Amino acid sequence: MKNFIVVAVILVIAMSCGTSKSTSNKDTSVAQVGDTISISSDKTEYEILIIEPGFNAWLNSIAQPKGYYSQDYLENKNIFYVNEWNSRVNQRRRFNADLYELPINYSPTIDYGYDVNYQLYNYFIYFQNKYKQNLLGGRVPPN
């Protein structure tokens, strides 16, 4: 299974097996422990694990509900967010290295499924609001 791991303010994607592609996101399981959220799907072979104090509460109370955004919308936003994130990882003197420790390996050619894209997108929104960062060059989305 391929993994997305978000620890505190660190985003890491650990790639572990071949690139499987699927458009279905059925058979998705969600496990929550305190401030840890794990989303996995047998169909897409990808998982996202987010460990960030306050994110779970924010996701359940402030974030737009699942289905509000299309998967295409989430994927397009995530591509921009990931590119900017990775750019900041490479500019340690300009950006806080404690916030941008590790790059994210996110490919626009892989279908990670709706749930993984939803979690990643919302983490970027949460991250921007909590740490007063602006990953897209405009106003931080209020979400």
Image (tube, rainbow, N blue to C red):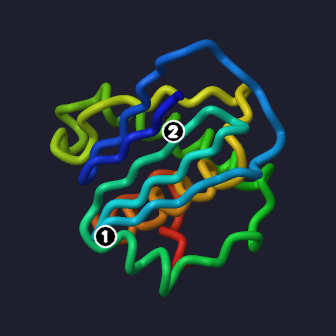
Q: Is residue 8 above or below residue 84?
A: below
In this rendered view, identify the residue nearer to me: 143 or 118: 118
In terms of image quadrants, where is residue 23?
A: top right
In this rendered view, identify the residue nearer to me: 100 or 14: 14
Q: Using a 10 Å C-alpha cutoff, classify the residue at mark 2 as few (fewer than 14 neighbours), some (14 to 19) or many (20 or more).
A: many
Amino acid type, residue under disc 1 in the picture: Lys
Residue 111 in picture, x, y percent from top left? 73, 34
Residues under labels 1 and 2: Cα distance? 18 Å
Residue at left 48%, top 45%? 48
Image position of 5 (left or right of 40): left
Image marks 1 and 2: residues in contact by CB distance under 8 Å: no
Residue at left 52%, top 41%? 47
The answer to which of marks 1 and 2 sits earlier in the sequence is: 2
Residue at left 24%, top 68%? 53
What SS does tag 2 mark? helix
Residue 25 in picture, x, y percent from top left? 75, 48
Q: Which residue is mark 1?
A: 130
Residue at left 38%, top 80%? 57
Q: Which residue is mark 2?
A: 82
Residue 92 in picture, x, y percent from top left? 21, 32
Image position of 98 (left or right of 142): left
What residue occupies the far top of the structure in this picture? 18
